[in-house]
């Protein structure tokens, strides 16, 4: 469970997400614990379900990177998560914009 202090770094949305507004590490919810960075989703998963298997990652199954709602957390592998993210259309607009930048400008 998140501490009271950590809960102040979240916002509950009308559609059921618990969005982290605190610090991020590599774009993911994180807190400093001494000189270590602790990823919030991993801590919540381990607290509820136990040790995370080697090679697994904790993801927000809702597709919201900063969502720390325990009901929205699941385990995946890094490659599988990328396919889930892509299926949800995450980063699609950014990828399309990058492709447009690589196309040659029309002549004429």
Image (spheres, helix red, strand yellow):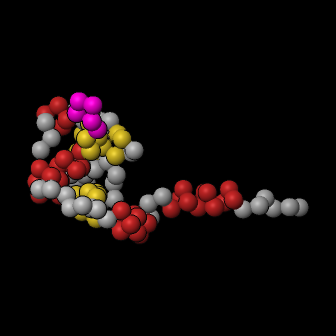
Q: Nearer the viewer, residue 56 or 69?
A: 56
> In which quadrant of the rendered image does the C terminus lie?
bottom right
Q: Position of residue 13 (x, y in %)?
A: 26, 48
- Asked if one can make out residue 72 in the rendered structure from this viewpoint, the answer is no
Residue at the extreme front of the image, as rendered:
54
Residue at 22% in and 50% down? 42
Identify the residue at horizontal 28%, vertical 50% (top origin). Answer: 67
- The verdict on residue 75 being magenta is no
Q: Nearer the viewer, residue 58 or 60?
A: 58
What residue do we see at 81% from left, 62% from top?
A: 106
Is 62 on the left-hand or right-hand side of 8?
Answer: right
Compared with residue 23, is residue 41 higher up or lower down, i.e. above or below? below
What x and y, as percent, mark residue 85?
Answer: 39, 63
Q: Residue 49: in sight, yes or no?
A: yes
Could you tell me residue 64's position as x and y percent?
Answer: 33, 54
Residue 34 within the magenta-colored segment of the rendering: yes
Q: Which residues are magenta?
A: 33-37
Camera-nearest residue between 36 and 30: 36
Q: Is residue 48 left or right of residue 21?
A: left
Q: Which quadrant is home to the N terminus? A: top left
Which quadrant of the view contains residue 4? top left
Closer to us: 68 or 17: 68
Instruction: Give the image quarter of residue 79.
Output: bottom left
The secondary structure that most of the magenta stretch takes on is strand
């Amino acid at each position: 469970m998140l501490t009271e202090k950590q809960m102040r770094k979240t916002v509950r949305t009308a559609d059921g997400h618990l969005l982290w507004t605190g610090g991020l590490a590599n774009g993911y919810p994180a807190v400093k614990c001494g000189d270590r960075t602790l990823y919030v989703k991993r801590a919540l998963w381990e607290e509820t379900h136990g040790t995370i298997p080697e090679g697994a990652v904790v993801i927000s199954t809702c597709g919201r990177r900063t969502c720390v709602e325990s009901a929205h957390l699941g385990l995946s592998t890094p490659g599988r998560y990328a396919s889930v993210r892509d299926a949800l259309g995450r980063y699609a607009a950014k990828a399309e914009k990058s492709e447009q930048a690589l196309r040659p400008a029309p002549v004429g």
